[in-house]
Image (tube, rainbow, N blue to C red):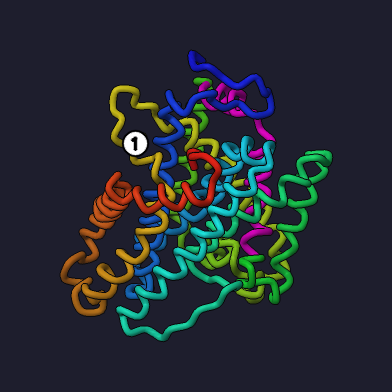
């Protein structure tokens, strides 16, 4: 790598904020696009519960997009954790309540039933709280044997689904289910990860894995979609009804698929060294995460009533238009003009500006 790297071998990071590796910013943009697309698909699925195309797209995305996003968060969290930058982690707590406030206002504008809980969350704000808590608990856990911590977190994540009481309070279910991906990212060396996914043989295998899984989902969606409730990490195995006793094995299978698919996506995301538009957007994924849901909820499923207009706007043969619509929303929310409020929050939450 031609960039100047930190001497800390456990934390391969640039000494200066620039230059950056465009591949990772491109990957972050792709993942936030999948987040937006996934939330639009959920809205459509509430209207058209029988659409196989919507189910295929949603199932395919949800098997890996949040595990990979959280893995990247852990991969690039080493500096904050190793230097015990609690103020940077507090920033995510502020973002958590910012999202809850925005969604409260959005629900009010749509005349929905209003409710607010300080410590419980069933919507998108959970991710911000997760980043805050993941960073805080990883500081002491990083002093222990990393293999032991990872295996224990994995074991807990596999069995937590049997306790239906573990749910949205402090987003506990999602925290437990997704923490192994964060800790794995924290433990792995960035340069070694980059070297591994840059190998030609890995790229070839990545293409094969993605194609095979896509074909499998396309053909078998009606037989496997019943598993989808546990992909979010929020639901207990009781949602699987008569298959709940096999929940631990399904979770393990989910982890294996998420790992293979995540590595495959990382390997195939290009750098686009001469095209910086996607990497520039990829630097502002957090603001996109905060802003996109009100736009989707109010306009796409509020102003444009899906029960009336959806069949006319996107008939079954043309619902592929969901993809460019999601891309447009993602790019709009990633514009630099929305960055100022987040810069102000960083200024007051952090001792110095850090790249999130």
Q: Quadrant of residue 146?
A: top right
The residue under the point 83% across, 41% down is 144
Q: Nearer the viewer, residue 281 or 227?
A: 281
Residue 352 drawn above or below residue 95: above
Residue 71's place in the image compared with 12, above or below, is below
Camera sees residue 56 = no
Tell me residue 113's x, y (percent). 41, 86
69 sits left or right of 177 in the view: left
Most foreground residue, 339 or 306: 339
Q: Does residue 322 appear anywhere in the picture? A: yes
In the image, what residue occupies the spot 50% across and 20% down?
A: 200
The answer to which quarter of the image holds residue 240 is bottom right
Residue lying furthest left: 312
Give how far across and how far down residue 111 sits, in percent: 32, 84
Q: Does the stretch in magenta take in 186? A: yes
Let me know if residue 75 is in the magenta part: no
Q: Secondary structure at mark 1?
A: helix
Estimate the x, y position of residue 289 in percent, counting from the top left: 41, 55
Label 1 packing within 10 angstroms: few (<14), some (14-19), many (20+): some
* Nearest the eye: 29 or 212: 29
The residue singled out by tag 1 in the image is: 280
Q: Residue at x 56, y 21 (%)?
A: 195
Q: Taking 193 as reference, is 138 above or below it? A: below
Residue 177: x percent and y percent?
A: 65, 58
Q: Is residue 41 left or right of residue 8?
A: left
Q: Is residue 61 left or right of residue 109?
A: right
* Residue sitting at the far top: 2
Which secondary structure type mostly characterizes the magenta part of the structure? helix
What's the residue at 46%, 60% (across, down)?
A: 221
Query: Could you say which is closer to the camera, residue 284 or residue 216?
Result: 284
Query: What residue range appears in magenta?
Result: 173-198
């Amino acid at each position: 790598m031609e960039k100047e790297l930190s001497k800390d071998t456990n934390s391969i990071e640039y000494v200066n904020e620039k230059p950056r590796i465009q591949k990772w910013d491109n990957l972050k943009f792709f993942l936030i696009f999948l987040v937006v697309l996934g939330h639009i698909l959920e809205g459509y699925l509430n209207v058209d519960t029988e659409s196989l195309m919507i189910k295929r797209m949603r199932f395919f995305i949800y098997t890996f997009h949040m595990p990979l996003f959280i893995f990247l968060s852990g991969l690039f969290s080493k500096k904050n954790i190793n230097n015990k930058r609690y103020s940077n982690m507090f920033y995510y707590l502020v973002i958590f309540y910012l999202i809850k406030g925005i969604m409260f206002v959005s629900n009010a504008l749509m005349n929905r039933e209003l409710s607010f809980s300080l410590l419980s969350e069933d919507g998108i704000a959970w991710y911000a709280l997760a980043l805050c808590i993941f960073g805080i608990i990883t500081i002491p856990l990083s002093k222990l044997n990393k293999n032991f911590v990872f295996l224990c977190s994995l074991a807990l994540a596999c069995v937590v689904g049997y306790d239906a009481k573990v749910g949205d309070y402090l987003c506990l279910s999602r925290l437990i289910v997704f923490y192994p991906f964060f800790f794995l990212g924290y433990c792995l060396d960035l340069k070694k990860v980059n070297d591994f996914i840059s190998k030609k043989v890995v790229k070839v295998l990545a293409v094969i894995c993605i194609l095979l899984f896509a074909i499998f989902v396309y053909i078998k969606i009606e037989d496997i979609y019943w598993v989808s409730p546990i992909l979010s990490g929020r639901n207990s195995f009781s949602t699987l009804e008569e298959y709940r006793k096999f929940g631990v094995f399904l979770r393990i299978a989910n982890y294996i698929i998420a790992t293979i698919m995540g590595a495959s996506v990382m390997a195939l995301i290009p750098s686009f060294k001469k095209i910086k538009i996607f990497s520039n957007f990829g630097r502002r994924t957090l603001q996109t995460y905060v802003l996109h849901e009100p736009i989707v909820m109010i306009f796409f499923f509020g102003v444009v009533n899906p029960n009336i207009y959806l069949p006319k706007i996107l008939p079954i043969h043309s619902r592929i238009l969901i993809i460019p619509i999601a891309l447009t929303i993602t790019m709009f929310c990633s514009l630099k003009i929305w960055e100022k409020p987040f810069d102000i929050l960083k200024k007051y939450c952090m001792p110095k500006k850090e790249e999130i």
